[in-house]
């Protein structure tokens, strides 16, 4: 199974400042079709997860453009250009290249300083 | 709008069974694969099972293989998770999640979840 490792696991941030979360996979996430199936999700306290980014860098509809995804191979990053209060919660990366199983990172908890 | 509504959770003793249901609406259910994903209290997300759009293929996580079975009824727009021989470690919120169809990347819609508590 592909192991997804996120860092940091806890991220205190200042409102208006940038934030960055790293996600590393135990093997390359490039599929034989050439696509990299790496997603990012955000889960607010008491809510279901919401997909933010799919295929590394594609923002879902309604996701603010302060969120961006990048990376390739085994190293991926989610960046928030200017953190807002509504961005608190836990962020997960997930790979969908080598399945089953689909595997998630441990989660990164973002909180306001 | 797309809606996924889970039901069937509750408190059961170890070794007992439970069947979860997920009623889908707002999209062409019979064209989409469907997943179950769970989250133990205070923990991260764990993929549980997938079923193809027509039910022809199914996969289950190793942690539930042989005990849980995913199924669907396209005439009722519903996906199920039959959970047998439940263990304390199966305690979690179980989410129904929309899967793949054509060029629509999976995991785009999640239900609110249903809580399963396994305790003696």
Image: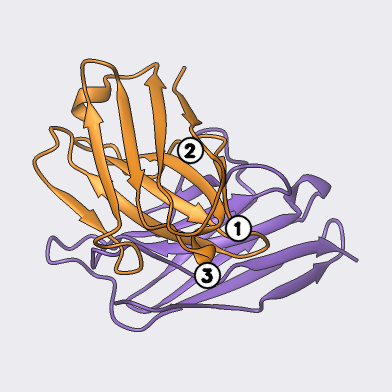
> What is the number of the mark on residue B24?
none
Regarding residue A42, the answer to whether it shows in the image is: yes
Question: Residue B85's x, y, as percent?
Answer: 37, 58
Question: Residue B10's x, y, as percent?
Answer: 57, 40
In this orientation, which residue lies closer to the viewer: B24 or A80?
B24
Look at the numbered disc 1 and give the secondary structure of its residue.
Answer: loop
Q: Which residue is labeled 3 in the image? A: A77
Q: Residue at x 35, y 84 (%)?
A: A26
Q: Which residue is labeled 1 in the image? A: B119
Q: Which residue is labeled 2 in the image? A: B110
Q: Residue at x 27, y 44 (%)?
A: B70
User: Mark 1 packing: few (<14 Cα in 10 Å), some, or many (20+)?
Assistant: some
In this orientation, which residue lies closer to the viewer: A103 or A60?
A103
Q: Alpha-carbon distance for marks 3 and 2?
A: 23 Å
- Color used for chain A? purple
Question: Residue A12's x, y, as percent?
Answer: 82, 70
Q: Alpha-carbon distance for marks 2 and 1?
A: 26 Å
Q: Alpha-carbon distance for marks 3 and 1?
A: 39 Å
Q: Chain of mark 1?
A: B
């Amino acid at each position: 199974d592909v192991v997804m490792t996120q860092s940091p696991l806890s991220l205190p941030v200042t409102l208006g400042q940038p934030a960055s979360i790293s996600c590393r996979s135990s093997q390359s996430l490039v599929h034989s079709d050439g696509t990299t199936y790496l997603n990012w999700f955000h889960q607010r306290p008491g809510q279901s997860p919401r997909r933010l980014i799919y295929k590394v860098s594609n923002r879902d509809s309604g996701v603010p453009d302060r969120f961006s995804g990048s990376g390739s191979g085994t190293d991926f990053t989610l960046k928030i250009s200017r953190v807002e209060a509504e961005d608190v919660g836990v962020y997960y990366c997930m790979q969908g290249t080598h399945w089953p199983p689909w595997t998630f990172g441990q989660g990164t908890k973002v909180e306001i300083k | 709008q797309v809606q996924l509504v889970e039901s069937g959770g509750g408190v059961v003793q170890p070794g007992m069974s439970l069947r979860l249901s997920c009623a889908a609406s707002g999209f062409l259910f019979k064209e989409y694969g469907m997943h179950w994903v769970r989250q133990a209290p205070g923990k991260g997300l764990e993929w549980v099972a997938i079923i193809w759009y027509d039910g022809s293929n199914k996969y289950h996580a190793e942690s539930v293989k042989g005990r849980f079975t995913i199924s669907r009824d396209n005439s009722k727009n519903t996906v199920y998770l039959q959970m047998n021989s439940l263990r304390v470690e199966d305690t979690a919120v179980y989410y129904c999640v929309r899967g793949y169809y054509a060029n629509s990347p999976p995991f785009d819609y999640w239900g609110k979840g249903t809580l399963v508590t396994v305790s003696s």
